[in-house]
Amino acid sequence: MSDDSGAVSARTDGTPEFELPAWLELLSDTSEPARLAHLIVEAIVPGFADSAGIFVLEHMLTDGPVSQPAGTEIVVRRLATILTVEGSPIPGAVLPAAQVIAFAAGSPYARCVRQGTPVIFAQPGDQTMQRVTRGIRTAFGRYEYFLAAPLTARDQVLGFLVLGRSAGQQAFGDGDAATAAGLGARAGTGIARSLGAAAGRATSRRTVY
């Protein structure tokens, strides 16, 4: 395994077992969650998927209301996204970081967060497609398989990791879902520590002597 890429081995069923590079653990104390999220998606693409995005529940970043009852949309903030095909970025497919988005209660993203388990799906959904630019809709059309996995830290769900694979790639299966759950746990733990470091830095700046 090289120092700048994830490790890929095989499960007994032949599906790839992908791991985030060990050096990312050293960066989880950074007080810049978006920077850490960007490094995580860069490590995932293209080794495990053609696209990857990390979204954190908005209240984790703003200390807003925590309760998001079943049957209501979830509000998240995009920290980082990479969209590629065959390892190359898709021209014009740029999703802005720090964008706040509400996903419908029945969306695979909301179900992933509320159930705390990975969800495999075929299309982002009409509401999602209506809220993105034409260039992004075209980019999404290049993908046939999607997988959302919860970002977890201990027993807490912080948000979700969403992955995509383009036409010609292997569809996501149960083995991939298990791998994504592990990625979500490692990424979630790192981002939780990063959020804690950011909160500590903000508190220290407000201290009055």
Image: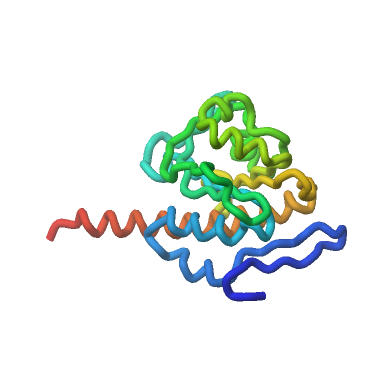
Q: Residue 35: image x %, image y %?
A: 43, 58
In the rendered view, tell whether residue 57 sits above or below residue 18: above
Q: Residue furthest front?
A: 91
Left or right, 180 with respect to 154, comes to right
- Residue 1 visible (yes or no): yes
- Residue 68 visible (yes or no): no
Task: Name the residue nearer the viewer: 143 or 62.
Answer: 143
In the rendered view, tell whether residue 186 sits above or below residue 111: below
Q: Quadrant of the C terminus?
A: bottom left
Left or right, 197 with respect to 75, comes to left
In the rendered view, tell whether residue 31 sits above or below residue 134: below
Residue drawn at (80%, 64%) of the image: 10
Q: Residue furthest bottom?
A: 2
In the rendered view, tell whether residue 109 sits above or below residue 10: above
Residue drawn at (56%, 47%) of the image: 53
Q: Residue 149: image x %, image y %?
A: 64, 46
